[in-house]
């Protein structure tokens, strides 16, 4: 798999590090609009596909049956940082469906949010499953399993009916059979599928403009996009790229990160999907690359670009809070 130089890291304007990767812009018909590097190589999309996985929560009828809120649907799509704004509604959601966090299949961890983690440690509170970045997705799967009278135990395993239907769902959105490619295990215990980067871009584009999909799928996608736009902080947290770009653009650009340098963007007005993979897996580079691609596409207003400037050109600070370099696009 060949990569292109996407991002440079400087110190006193001299290049110190380089991040290579691949990126693709697709339309909802499956055409490649722009590309950088090899977009046919297999990648693990990881959490970038969570908004698409949430389609099942709505199409199954589980969302309506349990009267899920925008907050809960946004959390189902999230890789949240474990702030109180994430912990409290997930715990409440579980209680409402008659379950508790012991039934989540993800591991017990400290929150990714440093302040929340420090408060927990200071109070003597132990790490919990509720704090896991994927607890919203897991709660969504438990909700769907309950509604469909499927087993709760083992819902995270590849052979579980919900995981099999998820494979079919993502295969349909991406226009490729995921079962033909390797499947690993994700950090939260779920199956970790692989697919060509181009097909991840196609899936994002079809999420952006679901024309030609079934009426139920169009309705589900629109419901999810509304929830993500309505509750952007639930998607990640304060001072995060995913939450900030959804809020600043009022949902015109919805982004979702995946581990190891993956990020997608859903551009509903343009009917385009963007998918980026940073080769070395460093997450600091993916928002910078995506912001450069959005600049190429001309989708952000001058005001939006100004509000998101810290993600387009992040500054490097030393321990004295002095600016010593920056992370810049090489696209």
Image: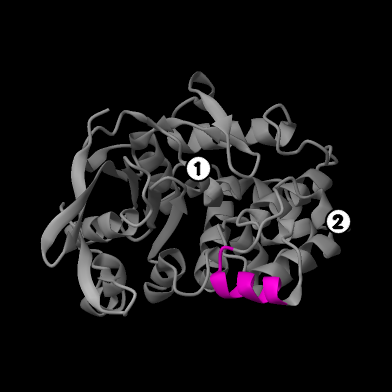
Q: Give how far across and how far down residue 265 sits, in percent.
A: 37, 54
> Which residue lies most toward the front here?
319
Marks 1/2: CA distance?
Answer: 26 Å
> Which residue lies most toward the top here?
180
Q: Give how far across and how far down residue 64 sits, in percent.
A: 74, 58
> What residue is shown at x 22% (from left), y 59% (from top)?
292
Q: Give how far across and how far down residue 58 sits, in percent.
A: 66, 52
Tell me, for residue 46, which label it has, or none.
1
Q: Secondary structure at mark 2?
A: loop
Q: Report the number of discs.
A: 2
First along the sequence among labels 1 and 2: 1
* Contact between labelled residues 2 and 1, with CB atoms less than 8 Å apart: no
Q: Within 10 angstroms of label 1, few (less than 14), some, or many (20 or more) residues?
A: many
Taking 149 as reference, is 7 left or right?
left
Q: Give how far across and how far down residue 290 sits, in percent.
A: 29, 56
Q: Within 10 angstroms of label 2, few (less than 14), some, or many (20 or more) residues?
A: some
Taking 299 as reference, is 175 left or right?
right
Taking 16 as reference, is 44 left or right?
right
199 and 121: which one is in front?
121
Q: Is residue 117 magenta?
A: yes
| Any part of residue 218 in sight | no
Image quadrant where residue 185 sits: top right
Which residues are the magenta region?
112-122
Image quadrant where residue 187 sits: top right
> What residue is shown at x 30% (from left), y 54% (from top)?
285
Name the residue that disc number 2 marks: 99
Q: Is residue 14 magenta?
A: no
Tell me, for residue 234, which label it has, or none.
none
Main secondary structure along the magenta-highlighted residues: helix
169 and 41: which one is in front?
41
Q: Secondary structure at mark 1?
A: helix
**Looking at the picture, does residue 321 appear above or below residue 203?**
below
């Amino acid at each position: 798999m060949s990569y292109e130089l996407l991002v440079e890291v400087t110190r006193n304007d001299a290049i110190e590090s380089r991040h290579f990767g691949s990126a693709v812009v697709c339309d909802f018909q499956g055409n490649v609009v722009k590309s950088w590097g090899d977009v046919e190589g297999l990648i693990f999309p990881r959490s970038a596909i969570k908004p698409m996985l949430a389609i099942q929560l709505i199409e199954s009828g589980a969302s309506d049956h349990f009267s899920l809120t925008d907050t809960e649907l946004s959390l189902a799509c999230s890789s949240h940082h474990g702030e109180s704004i994430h912990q409290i509604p997930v715990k409440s959601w579980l209680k409402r469906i008659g379950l508790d966090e012991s039934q989540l299949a993800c591991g017990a961890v400290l929150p990714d949010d440093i302040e929340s983690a420090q408060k927990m440690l200071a109070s003597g509170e132990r790490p919990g499953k509720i704090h896991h970045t994927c607890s919203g997705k897991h709660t969504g799967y438990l909700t769907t399993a309950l509604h469909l009278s499927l087993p709760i135990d083992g819902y995270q395993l590849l052979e579980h009916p919900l995981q099999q239907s998820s494979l079919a769902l993502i295969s349909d959105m991406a226009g490729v059979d995921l079962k033909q490619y390797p499947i690993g295990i994700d950090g939260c215990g779920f199956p970790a599928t692989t697919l060509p980067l181009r097909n991840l871009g196609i899936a994002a584009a079809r999420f952006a403009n679901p024309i030609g999909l079934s009426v139920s799928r169009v309705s589900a996608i629109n419901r999810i996009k509304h929830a993500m736009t309505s509750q952007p902080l639930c998607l990640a947290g304060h001072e995060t790229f995913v939450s900030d770009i959804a809020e600043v653009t009022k949902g015109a650009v919805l982004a979702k990160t995946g581990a190891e340098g993956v990020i997608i963007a859903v551009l509903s007005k343009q009917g385009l999907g963007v998918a980026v993979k940073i080769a070395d897996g460093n997450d600091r580079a993916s928002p910078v690359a995506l912001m450069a691609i959005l600049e190429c596409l001309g989708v952000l207003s001058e005001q939006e670009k100004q509000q998101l400037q810290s993600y387009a050109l992040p500054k490097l600070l030393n321990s004295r809070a002095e600016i010593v370099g920056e992370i810049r696009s090489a696209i």
